[in-house]
Structures are given as C-alpha cells and as structure tokens.
Amino acid sequence: MILEQQAPDLLAGHEPVFALLFDMNVLWERFVAWLLRRACSALPGLEVTTQVSHALFHTPGKPARTVRPDIVLRRPGTKVPVLVADSKWKVPDRGTPSDDDLKQMFVRVQRAARRARRGARVSAGRRGSGAH
C-alpha cells in the first residue's frame, strides 16, 4: 500500500485501495493457544494441542460426524485432557455465553475430552469485563 501511495480510509471514495482481511476467529484461537503454550513451557508436563477431531457419531456407509475442540491441554502420553478450551472472538451478550455456545462446550468436554477435568470458554471481551 505504501509503495502504491495508497492508504486505507473509512469513507467510500473513487480510488481503489488494498484491503487486508483477517479471520478474527482463527487469529484469536491461535493467540490463545500461543498464550497457553507459553504458560505451559514453564510448567513441565503439559502440552497444548489445537483442532484435533474426535468421532461423535457414525452411521454405516456415511462419513463420521466429529467434534473438534479449539484447544486441549493434557499431560504428554495421556489421552485424558486436563482442560478443554473453546475460543470465541465475540463478546457474550450481557456477559453470558449463548445456549448454543454452552451446548457446544458441553459436547466438546463430554465427548471429545471424555473425562476432562475442566472446560473453559475464552472470549474476546472489553477490558474489565471479566473472564468468560
């Protein structure tokens, strides 16, 4: 943009400009995973995995339905997670997660993690609004 002497503007105009678009859901999930990996590096015995699919339901002759938790913390060499986290790039309405978000987290903890000790929803939020 700089080399082309162009700059983004919030107003519509007659000149074409370059646009940079990011999927904030993916960016937020990667940021949260990075923070957890950084924190876990000081705690030996924990590993962070992201987007690992687990079978949920299978009908013979059809592809299996799966769930894919955003982030899972577990001890190396074990299948039982210590924490299953769902990252959301949205501010919950009135500070409360939606029913759909809660059901999604429940399924991920119960099925994908099976015996996870903890489940968490990590939302982007306003400063001072507390953790979700």
Image: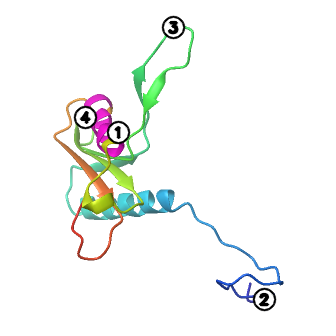
Q: Which residue is mark 3?
A: 60
Residue occupying the point 20% across, 31% down: 115
Q: Earlier in the sequence, mark 4 or mark 3?
A: 3
Neighbor class of circle 1 (other Cα within 10 Å; few <14, some 14-19, many 20+) is some
Q: Position of residue 84 (x, y in %)?
A: 28, 44
Residue ID for mark 4:
78
In the rendered view, would you say 72 is above or below 108?
A: below
Residue 110 shown in magenta: yes
Q: Which mark is in front, 4 or 3?
A: 3
Most extreme residue toward the top, as rendered? 60
What type is the residue that disc 1 sits on?
Answer: Gln
Amino acid identity at mark 2: Leu
Q: Which residues are magenta?
A: 100-111
Can residue 21 be seen at all in this image of the molecule? yes
Residue depicted at x 32% and y 59%: 93
Q: Secondary structure at mark 4?
A: loop
Q: Real-space Cα distance between discs 1 and 3?
A: 25 Å
Would you name the residue on which mark 1 appears? 104
Q: Which mark is residue 3?
A: 2
Can you say whether 82 is above or below 97 in the image?
above
How far apart are labels 4 and 1 at the CA level?
24 Å
Give the image location of residue 57, x and y in percent: 42, 19
Side (left or right) of 94 relative to 27: left
Quarter of the image where one finds residue 113? top left
Viewport quadrant of the N terminus: bottom right
Q: Nearer the viewer, mark 1 or mark 3?
A: 1
Mark 2 surroundings within 10 Å by alpha-carbon count, few (fewer than 14), some (14 through 19), many (20 or more) = few
In space, the residues marked 1 and 2 are separated at their CA atoms by 46 Å
Q: Amino acid at mark 4?
A: Thr
Q: Main secondary structure of the magenta part?
A: helix
